[in-house]
Image: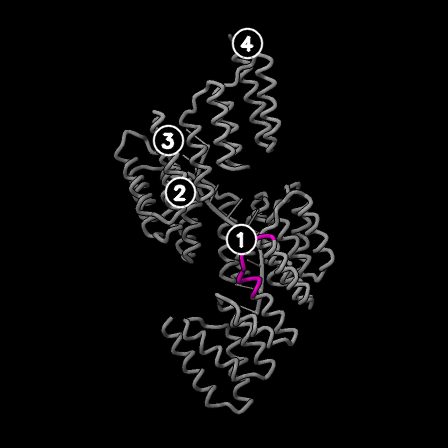
DNA sequence: GTAGGGTTAG
């Protein structure tokens, strides 16, 4: 008996190792071989497999493992169902989550605090904060002991659903009741505040963190850096990067990609090259985001051929390109003056099943305008279902360059009515263009509309 | 078996 249990333990270690590196077929083969040798898989064996199928394949595939598990005479437990529910949550399958919950109850399996945590997370993910809150209250009123993750999911969900103040309040209340937040809680709150553009408060929490016994980690730093870059405070962001470096923090893929993207955006090519080299020499496994960043670097350097080559490598290497990959390519082709190539790529992207993408359209609008094809740019604009300030900025600026200042003025009026205010440089170019073409009245009218729009903001 | 950070356009 002892020998057999020990073997099952070994079997489970083996299954877990294969699952971690996504070799699910190998893991299944080991189970079959094990059975042949008299090693009996247990619930842990199957739960490991269920979790891996949820993570790497699909909930359906995981569910079929549950069938096989039952056939082998092993009953699923709460861990099995938590994995399935978590997988369904990750894939936004709300009705599936509720069905699985129901099925678990019918099987006589009692949900534990993790089941409820996942359910809360699911409701938040689907934009149902009230229902998530109800689950939270249920946990507090039940016999279950909330875990730190219960609070973290709650704080994170509140932030993501626009209830940043409630999240802060919960955090403070918990502290008052003796909850000592782990670093993750701080990171969640800092991230929520950053996303709500409340950088001052985020910094204050960072200060609190410094006064606690905890130390910020790479996640904390990347969150704050990324927030600075998003609000175009590049120097502040790079300062944080230097601090991170000087304090000896190891950069991971997230930190590298954040910094490289900012350097590329501000034309600091030398820095971008240096960081890219570091990242690629550091042994970090290149995932799709790091490949996209590398692709963007090649495009920004005008190396379109090399970009195409990399695209091939990515696709042949087993990674599935996403809308970022394609949009980066489309912009790169536009910037290189290859509008036909860009349009071809947009077509390819649609063929690959990607929905029409505003950023890609904006790249093409800008590319057409810069190539002097302003009429074609306008045609594309007219065919678009949604437009944003990037669309209008490109069009207005390129119409001005083509001397079509009245048309540009009409467009700017339109976006002012829609509550958008274009870049200062665009406004300047248009007002100057109107005046130098003798349309001083139009310029005056436009200027007062801009003032009004800024007041209303 | 849960929770936090990264990539695209003017």
Crowding near pointer 2: few (<14 within 10 Å), some, many (20+)?
A: some
Q: Nearer the viewer, mark 2 or mark 4?
A: 2
Q: Position of residue A46 (x, y in %)?
A: 50, 24
Q: Distance between the residues labelled 2 and 4?
A: 44 Å
Crowding near pointer 4: few (<14 within 10 Å), some, many (20+)?
A: few
Q: State if disc 1 and disc 3 touch (CB < 8 Å).
A: no
Q: Distance between the residues labelled 3 and 2?
A: 14 Å
What residue is pinned by disc 4? A3
- The outermost residue toward the left is A141
Q: Position of residue A241 (x, y in %)?
A: 56, 52
Q: Nearer the viewer, mark 3 or mark 1?
A: 3
* Chain bearing mark 2: A
* Chain bearing mark 1: A
Mark 1 or mark 2, which has the lower sequence index?
2
In depth, the one of A24 and A156 nearer the eye is A24
Residues marked 3 and 1, same chain: yes
Q: Where is residue A354 in the image (x, y as percent from the top left)?
A: 56, 54
What residue is pinned by disc 1? A240
Q: What stretch is highlighted in magenta?
A: A352-361
Q: Nearer the viewer, mark 1 or mark 4?
A: 4
What residue is pinned by disc 3? A103
Secondary structure type for disc 2:
helix
Q: Distance between the residues labelled 3 and 1?
A: 49 Å
Residues marked 1 and 4, same chain: yes
Q: Does A129 appear in magenta? A: no
For residue B10, what is the image quadrant?
bottom right
Residues marked 4 and 3, same chain: yes
What residue is pinned by disc 2? A94
Q: Distance between the residues labelled 1 and 2?
A: 39 Å
Crowding near pointer 1: few (<14 within 10 Å), some, many (20+)?
A: some
């Amino acid at each position: 008996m002892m020998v057999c249990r020990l073997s099952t333990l070994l079997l489970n270690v083996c299954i877990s190792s294969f699952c971690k590196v996504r070799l699910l077929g190998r893991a299944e083969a080991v189970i079959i071989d094990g059975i042949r040798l008299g090693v009996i898989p247990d619930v842990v064996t199957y739960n490991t497999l269920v979790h891996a199928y949820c993570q790497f394949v699909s909930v359906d595939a995981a569910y079929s493992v549950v069938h096989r598990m039952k056939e082998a005479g092993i009953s699923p437990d709460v861990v099995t169902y938590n994995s399935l529910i978590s997988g369904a949550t990750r894939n936004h399958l709300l009705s599936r989550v509720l069905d699985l919950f129901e099925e678990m109850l019918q099987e006589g399996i009692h949900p534990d605090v993790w089941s409820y945590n996942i359910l809360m997370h699911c409701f938040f993910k689907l934009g149902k904060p009230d229902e998530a809150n109800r689950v939270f209250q249920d946990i507090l009123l039940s016999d279950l002991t909330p875990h730190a993750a219960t609070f973290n999911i709650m704080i994170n969900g509140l932030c993501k659903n626009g209830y940043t103040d409630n999240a802060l309040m919960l955090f403070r209340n918990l502290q008052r009741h003796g909850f000592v937040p782990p670093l993750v809680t701080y990171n969640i709150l800092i991230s929520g505040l950053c996303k709500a553009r409340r950088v001052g408060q985020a910094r204050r929490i960072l200060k609190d963190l410094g006064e606690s016994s905890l130390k910020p980690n790479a996640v904390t730093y990347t969150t704050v850096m990324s927030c600075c870059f998003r609000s175009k405070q590049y120097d502040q962001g790079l300062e944080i990067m230097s601090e991170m470096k000087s304090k000896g923090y190891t950069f991971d893929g997230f930190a590298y990609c954040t910094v490289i993207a900012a350097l590329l955006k501000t034309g600091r090519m030398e820095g971008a090259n240096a960081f890219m080299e570091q990242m690629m020499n550091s042994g970090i496994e290149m995932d799709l985001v790091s490949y996209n960043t590398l692709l963007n670097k090649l495009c920004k350097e005008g190396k379109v051929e090399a970009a195409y080559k990399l695209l091939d490598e990515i696709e042949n290497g087993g990674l599935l390109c996403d809308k970022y990959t394609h949009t980066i390519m489309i912009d790169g082709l536009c910037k290189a003056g290859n509008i036909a190539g860009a349009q071809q790529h947009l077509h390819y992207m649609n063929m690959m099943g990607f929905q029409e993408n505003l950023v890609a359209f904006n790249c093409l609008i800008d590319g057409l305008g810069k190539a002097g094809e302003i009429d074609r740019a306008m045609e594309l604009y007219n065919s678009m279902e949604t437009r944003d300030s990037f669309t209008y900025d490109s069009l207005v600026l390129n119409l001005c360059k083509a001397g079509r200042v009245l048309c540009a003025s009409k467009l700017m009026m339109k976006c002012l009515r829609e509550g958008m205010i274009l870049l200062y440089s665009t406004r300047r170019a248009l007002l100057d263009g109107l005046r130098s073409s003798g349309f001083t009245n139009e310029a005056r009218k436009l200027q007062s509309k801009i003032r009004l729009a800024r007041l209303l903001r």
